[in-house]
Image (cartoon, rainbow, N blue to C red):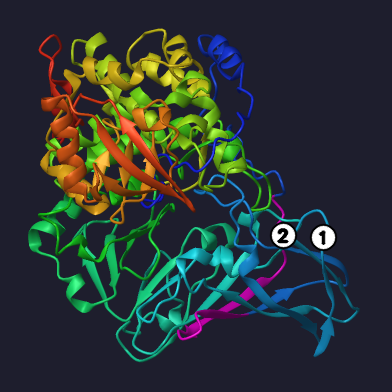
């Protein structure tokens, strides 16, 4: 999964107590064993975590989702579940792959009613497990009928908006109640989807035979899919839209790949041949990199919308991607975020096919453990950057700007003094992506971006140790390229990662990783760049890429005064140990005036610049709630924007890393 683009790296309203304990000892045992332990990676020897049973649930669950109620944004759902007389427990999915925590939208389930043989059957929610529903099936009932609704939020403040007048997103985990007692790959589902007339759709699901010859542009609005396991169903969402276009990204290939695009307006679908060529190159570069494909077909689902909530979520044979409407039309102006598709596509190999053993659970109501998310998400974040550049989705210089900003943030992050990178893998479970008062100090899901810097350092180290003969490309093909064509998840542990690195280039990789993942204030943010031939510096003018990003915020003063602002002058990000942090300014505060005049971003930039040249203090009037304060800054260092410059003491490895593979 990709972190929500709308979520800042840090936000603050009040200082919370320090919390949590270090995951001490995680590496100690694994690294000690890595040199001698030969963990089997053959799919017949590695547990897939499906210990809930190889016994198939009897019969097929019939599931019909009516998504045609656009006005009220309500999914109307009917299900027929084969049952036997006696007690029955049904689950609503709670622990969802890709979300790394308990993120089931249970509060949006409504109108629940069960019946059998035309008689109502009572249900009772488990008092300790809110996602479990208990029923007593009467004698003679072999099919349990269920009717209920899933209520899409009507506004972002209530959650992810999944229905608009033009776009529908169907996440099957929100539509299903499934029987307890069997693994998710042992329950068969026959899904049917009802769409508004004229809506077209994209999905990894395949239509049943009677629907195969239907054109998606016809007015026919009921589509029955081929039966799949519950696991594959939840892993195969649908994007449908009034305005829809499908692009073939792998023409004539044995394994098809398509880009399915829905949008608020038809003109947003207009992509140039050059833009589609970059998406085709993404498929080509990923195939060369990993040397395998672990899908029968692959469908990018891409929503271009201001109304349909943004998303970045991986699936084995598809991905959900929600971005701004100007994805194609603003191509030349804004490249920020165009690594999203590369990130989610990489997950087909890293996270879906090769998966940490503690994330392979029997079903969607078994708690997951996230100890290796710095591999699962951190390396995927890295490959997302790399593949975006290699394919031409983003320019190399823009990726360097991204790396500069990431390195600068973690080089300043105060939370790295007390909490290690490993412990941030617990955030999805106990934080659940809620906003944090002092995210800079508390730390967030840093295994993504700091994890990407870690894997840049591994890549540069491999190249340096081997005299440029080997790299993380070799790790990708050796680790993820096994069992070509297989879509069955293949589990791994830390020792597998270390052993593979040692096979590519002998080194004390266990100690190397332990220092960076379990240590405090590691040198990764800057060391990775320097070993790759570049140095982090700060300039007084933003780069082209940074300027486009800053325009969306109105002002990025993170490395000068210590905060970023939105268009209203509201502080959205803060650094605890910055001038603003030390002046006790809180995130969420509003800048009212600069040096006695009404706030404007340009006025604040001028004030910071003049303070440096004229040695003149900066005075802000700040409002937080009903309270106003005048704050004086004796800050004379000018505007600061992160940038990378060449460090000739090392080869230019970043340019080599970001160049297309042949």
Nearer-the-camera pick, 522 or 279: 522
Residue 499 in the image: state x and y as whole percent: 45, 17
Q: Secondary structure at mark 1?
A: loop
Q: Is residue 141 magenta?
A: no
Residue 72 covered by magenta stretch? yes
Residue for point 30% across, 56% down: 255
Mark 1, Cα crowd under 10 Å, few <14 / some 14-19 / many 20+, is: few
Magenta stretch in the rendered image: 54-77
- Residue 484: % across, % down: 37, 42
Q: Which residue is mark 2?
A: 131
Q: CA distance from mark 1 to mark 2?
A: 7 Å
Residue marked by disc 1: 126
Q: Is residue 569 left or right of residue 132?
A: left
| Image height of 136 relative to 440, above or below | below
Which image quadrant: the C terminus? top left
Q: Position of residue 498 (x, y in %)?
A: 45, 18
Q: Is residue 564 above or below residue 94?
A: above
* Residue 492 seen in this snapshot: no
Q: Position of residue 548 (x, y in %)?
A: 17, 49
Decide if residue 374 is in sight here. Answer: yes
Residue 136 falls left or right of residue 429: right
Residue at the image point whose x is 16% and y is 47% from the top = 602
Camera-side residue: 589 or 297?
A: 589
Identify the residue shown where x is 49% and y is 58%. 235
| Quarter residue 440 falls in | top left
Q: Nearer the viewer, residue 576 or 368?
A: 576
Q: Residues within 10 Å of mark 2 (few under 14, many from 20)?
A: some
Q: Is the Cβ of the residue at disc 1 closer than 8 Å to that at disc 2?
A: yes
Number of marks:
2
Q: Earlier in the sequence, mark 1 or mark 2?
A: 1
Quadrant in which residue 301 is drawn: bottom left
């Amino acid at each position: 999964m990709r972190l929500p683009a709308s979520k800042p790296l840090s936000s603050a309203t009040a200082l919370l107590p320090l919390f949590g304990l270090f995951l001490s000892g995680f590496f100690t045992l694994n690294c000690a064993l890595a040199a001698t332990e030969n963990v089997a990676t053959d799919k017949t020897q590695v547990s897939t975590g499906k210990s809930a049973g190889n016994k198939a649930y009897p019969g097929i669950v019939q599931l019909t989702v009516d998504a045609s109620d656009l006005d009220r944004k309500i999914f109307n759902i009917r299900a027929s579940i084969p049952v036997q007389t006696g007690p029955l427990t049904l689950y609503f999915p709670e622990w969802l792959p890709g979300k790394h925590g308990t993120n089931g939208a249970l509060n949006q389930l409504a109108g629940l009613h069960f019946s059998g043989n035309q008689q109502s059957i009572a249900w009772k929610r488990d008092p300790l497990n809110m996602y479990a529903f208990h029923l007593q099936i009467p004698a003679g009932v072999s099919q349990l009928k269920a009717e209920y609704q899933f209520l899409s939020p009507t506004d972002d403040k209530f959650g992810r908006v999944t229905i608009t007048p033009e776009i529908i997103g169907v996440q099957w985990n929100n539509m299903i109640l499934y029987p307890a007692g069997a693994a998710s790959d042992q329950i068969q589902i026959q899904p049917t989807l009802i769409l508004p007339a004229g809506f077209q759709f994209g999905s990894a699901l395949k239509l049943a035979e009677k629907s195969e010859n239907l054109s998606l542009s016809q007015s026919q609005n009921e589509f029955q899919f081929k039966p799949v396991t519950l696991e594959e169903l939840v892993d195969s969402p649908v994007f449908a839209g009034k305005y829809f276009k499908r692009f073939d990204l792998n023409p004539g290939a044995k394994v098809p790949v398509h880009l399915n695009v829905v949008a608020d307006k038809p003109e947003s679908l207009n992509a140039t041949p050059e833009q589609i060529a970059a998406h085709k190159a993404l498929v080509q570069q990923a195939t060369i990199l990993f040397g395998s494909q672990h899908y029968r077909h692959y469908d990018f689902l891409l929503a271009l919308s201001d109304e349909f909530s943004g998303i970045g979520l991986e699936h084995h044979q598809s991905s959900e991607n929600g971005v701004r409407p100007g994805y194609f039309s603003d191509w030349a102006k804004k490249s920020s975020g165009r690594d999203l598709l590369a990130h989610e596509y990489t997950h087909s190999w890293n996270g879906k096919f090769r998966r940490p053993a503690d994330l392979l659970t029997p079903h969607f109501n078994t708690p997951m453990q996230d100890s290796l998310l710095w591999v699962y998400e951190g390396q995927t974040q890295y490959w997302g950057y790399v593949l975006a550049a290699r394919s031409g989705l983003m320019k190399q210089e823009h990726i360097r700007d991204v790396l500069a900003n990431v390195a600068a943030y973690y080089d300043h992050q105060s939370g790295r003094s007390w909490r290690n990178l490993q412990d941030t893998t617990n955030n999805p479970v106990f934080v659940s992506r809620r906003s944090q008062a002092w995210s800079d100090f508390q730390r967030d899901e840093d295994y993504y971006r700091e994890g990407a810097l870690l894997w840049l350092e591994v890549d540069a180290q491999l190249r340096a140790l081997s005299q440029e003969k080997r790299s993380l490309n070799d790790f990708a093909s050796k680790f993820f390229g096994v069992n070509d064509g297989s879509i069955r998840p293949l589990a791994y542990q830390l020792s597998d990662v270390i052993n593979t690195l040692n096979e590519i280039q002998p080194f004390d990789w266990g100690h190397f990783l332990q220092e960076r993942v379990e240590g405090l204030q590691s040198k990764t943010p800057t060391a990775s760049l320097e070993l790759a031939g570049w140095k982090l510096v700060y300039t007084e003018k933003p780069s082209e890429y940074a300027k486009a990003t800053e325009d969306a915020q109105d002002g990025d003063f993170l490395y000068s005064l210590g905060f970023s602002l939105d268009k209203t002058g509201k502080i959205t990000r803060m650094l605890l140990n910055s001038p603003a942090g030390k002046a006790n300014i809180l995130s969420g505060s509003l800048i009212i005036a600069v040096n006695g005049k009404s706030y404007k971003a340009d006025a604040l930039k001028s004030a910071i610049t003049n303070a440096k040249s004229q040695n003149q203090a900066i005075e802000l009037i700040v409002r937080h709630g009903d309270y106003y304060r005048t704050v004086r800054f004796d800050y004379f260092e000018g505007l600061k924007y992160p940038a990378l410059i060449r460090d000739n003491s090392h080869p230019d490895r970043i340019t080599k890393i970001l160049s297309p593979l042949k």
